Amino acid sequence: MNILALADLQKTLTPHVPLGKSRLETLCMILLGMISARTVNLTHIASERPSRVMVASTYRRLQRFFQYVRLPEDWSVGIVISLLNNPRPWHLCLDRTNWKIGTADVNVLVLAVITTKFRVPLMWTLLPHSGNSTTAQRIALMKRYLAHFDASTVRVLLADREFIGQEWFAFLVENKIPFAIRMKEDQIVRTNGRELKFRSLLSRCKGVRGFTAVLPGKAGHPDLELHFGARRIKGGELLVVASPYPATGAHILRQYKKRWFIECLFADSKTRGLNLEDTRLTLTSKLSLLIAITAVAIALVCRAAAQIMGKKYPARKKHGYCAKSWFRIGFDEVRRWMRSSPETPLITRNLVVPRRPRAGVV
């Protein structure tokens, strides 16, 4: 890590993070250190410090940062969005990622922004249990999003079969949040006066099919009319995706296809990039702070890729996939930049981040 790179990032973030000079320097040290070392493990980050200070002393300084620093909830949201510099509306993806630290379960519900080029975590909830999230936890996370941004900023919310339920769908419809969410094959719907499972209704489905059906009301919630796209995928499994707004089956399925980007994000955060699972932090407040720093690091990498590539697109190989992902292009460039003597700032110092986000304002 170059000392000039550290100073440059510190000057950029000073107006936007409510920390003193020493704590902010430590934050920048962690942020650049995890990119340089390709891990969030504090021992390795301490070795990246551009100083003659003993590694053990730096390691203790990093430990104290997580021990004493408490930043406001969602403090990184404005910085992440400003770094992306992407016009709204955008796609949102909702999913969980989990791993174990010893016998402890780490279970994170993540809401990510998906653009044409990038995927970045925006907000998250650390679940106090293993397994699926509850409807209340999903609604609470979306309410946090709506406290910062208007519903019109959401082009479509994408999620897998875990994120279904009458109350959840009713909340999204009531708040005018468009979605494309995969359904289970045994879900019962009403169509043409009959109640059938998707498995029975679509038993002869071969190509792409679009249709409208009603989810029968449950637990005090009224019936909900939704539009669906369906087709058979590899292995004969049935893919059914629900949407609240009229659209062709092919369009609904094309929207849902983008959900895979959040799986790519988890890979960028873990084995292909920052190795988030290397952390030994288990306390919720400390782990949430680390994830926030990781989110800023990913956004920084995305910003670097955008500056390098401009309007160009990564070259593709014969199999059709990019030779390098946008994340990897930016990741390699930031690591190279930190090991050189940067004459120009990695981030423009006129970065605009609101101090108090309001509804509909980034």
Image: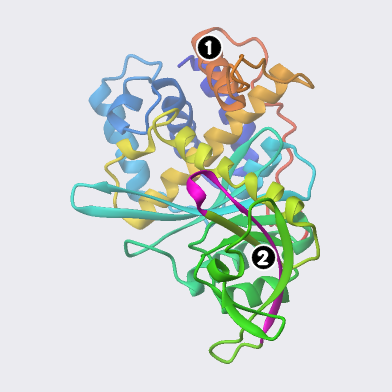
Horizontal side, residue 187 vs residue 246: left or right: left
Residue pictured at 61% horizontal, 70% vertical = 201
Q: Residues within 10 Å of mark 1 (few under 14, many from 20)?
A: some
Residue 341: x percent and y percent? 56, 7
Q: Is residue 67 magenta?
A: no
For label 2, the SS is helix
Residue 329's quadrant in the figure? top right
Which numbered marker is on residue 160? none
Q: Is residue 76 left or right of residue 361?
A: left
Q: Regarding mark 1 in the picture, which secondary structure is present there?
A: helix
> Which stretch is magenta?
223-237
The label number, if any, that marks residue 336 in the structure image: 1
Secondary structure that dominates the magenta span: strand
Is residue 300 visible to us here? yes
Q: Position of residue 362 (x, y in %)?
A: 74, 51
Residue 318 screen position, x and y as percent: 61, 14
Pointer 2 residue: 147
Mark 1: which amino acid? Arg
Task: Check disc 2 and give the amino acid type.
Answer: Ala
Look at the image and tell me whether residue 11 can be seen: no
Q: Quadrant of residue 261?
A: top right
